[in-house]
Amino acid sequence: MSHHYFFCIILLFHVGHLSASIVKICDDEIEFPPYTFFERDSQGTKTNLVGVTHDLLKEIFNHIDLTYKVDLVPWKRCIFEVEKYDTRKTYEMFSTGSYFLKRASKYYATAAYGVVNQGIFYSTQQHPDGINVNSIKDLQQFTQVCGVLGYSYRAYKLTDESKFMRAPSIVAGLKMLGSNRCQIMPLGIEVAQGVQLIEQYRIPKTIKVIRINAIKPTTFHLYISKSSPRAFEIYTKVNQQLVRMIHTGEVDKIHQKYADLLN
């Protein structure tokens, strides 16, 4: 009887240990190609979750003694749950998070595995010789700017709403630009490229972009809750593998995989 009881205790401990080894990760429920998005079938129905972040996590966890599970939830809830892991016990990590100092003070941030550079899109139909933009101040010359509803353009110093023609989506804004309804469209370069992976739309060759070097690029990282009792263990194992993948060129290959889908 005592031997049977002892065996049950060991079995329960083993099951509990396996369950605890699973790292629960959350990401935004809103698709963000090429990092996190769903494949579509021929009818346009969402199927498998794919993307740079998906492939990256799969490769990282293949090389460490932990397993993981990803849930897509509202973004504010996601980062809140990770911060409060010690009391909420829901998610220990979130992925595809941009970097800023206040956020980094609350979580362990890994090395960067992606970047978005800010740019100005324009149509060669309107500007056959290109646009003369050497600084953010030069953007004030434009009086008709395409923008997306809900987006802020303070980083571009564009705060005069009377100049904006707001579109319901990025694609709608690019189409407005292509039909000469505005002069420029401020937009993350990689964001514009990525949206083509989930929309039946390709940016026409008449639309060009210049990079705004004065605006610091946005980098993306994996974040681990500092309130988790194994926070540093997860951070160390995950980040070591990520740095290895950056060094070997595997991260670049993952990015190229999704860039090739647009060709």
Image (cartoon, rainbow, N blue to C red):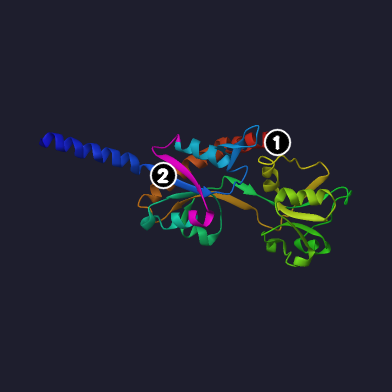
Q: Is residue 80 magenta?
A: no
Identify the residue at the far front of this view.
43
Disc 1: which residue: 262
Question: Which of 4/241 is in front?
Answer: 4
The stretch in magenta equals: 62-78
Q: Residues within 10 Å of mark 1 (few under 14, many from 20)?
A: few
| Relative height, residue 242 to residue 188 (above, below) | above
Q: Residue at x 49, y 36 (%)?
A: 58
Q: What residue appears at the point 80 percent right and 46 percent down from the top-left corner? A: 208
- Front residue (pair 238, 10): 10
Amino acid under label 2? Val
Could you tell me if the residues under marks 2 and 1 are in contact, i.e. CB atoms within 8 Å? no
Amino acid on which the number 1 mark rests in the picture: Leu
Residue 236 position, x and y percent, is: 43, 46
Residue at label 2? 23
Q: Whole-percent x and y of residue 262? A: 70, 36
Please indicate whether residue 217 sits to the left or right of residue 25 in the image.
Answer: right
The residues tagged by marks 2 and 1 sit, at their Cα atoms, a distance apart of 33 Å
Residue 110 appears in the rendering: no
Query: Closer to the N terminus: mark 2 or mark 1?
Result: 2
Does residue 69 show up magenta in the picture? yes
In the rendered image, which quarter contains the C terminus?
A: top right
Q: Nearer the viewer, residue 110 or 160?
A: 160
- Where in the figure is residue 46, as x and y percent of width and height? 59, 38
Query: Disc 2 on helix, strand or loop?
Result: strand
- Of 94 and 234, nearer the camera is 94
Quarter occupied by residue 63: top left
**Lateral position of residue 229 relative to residue 244, left or right:** left
Which element carries disc 1, helix, strand or loop? loop
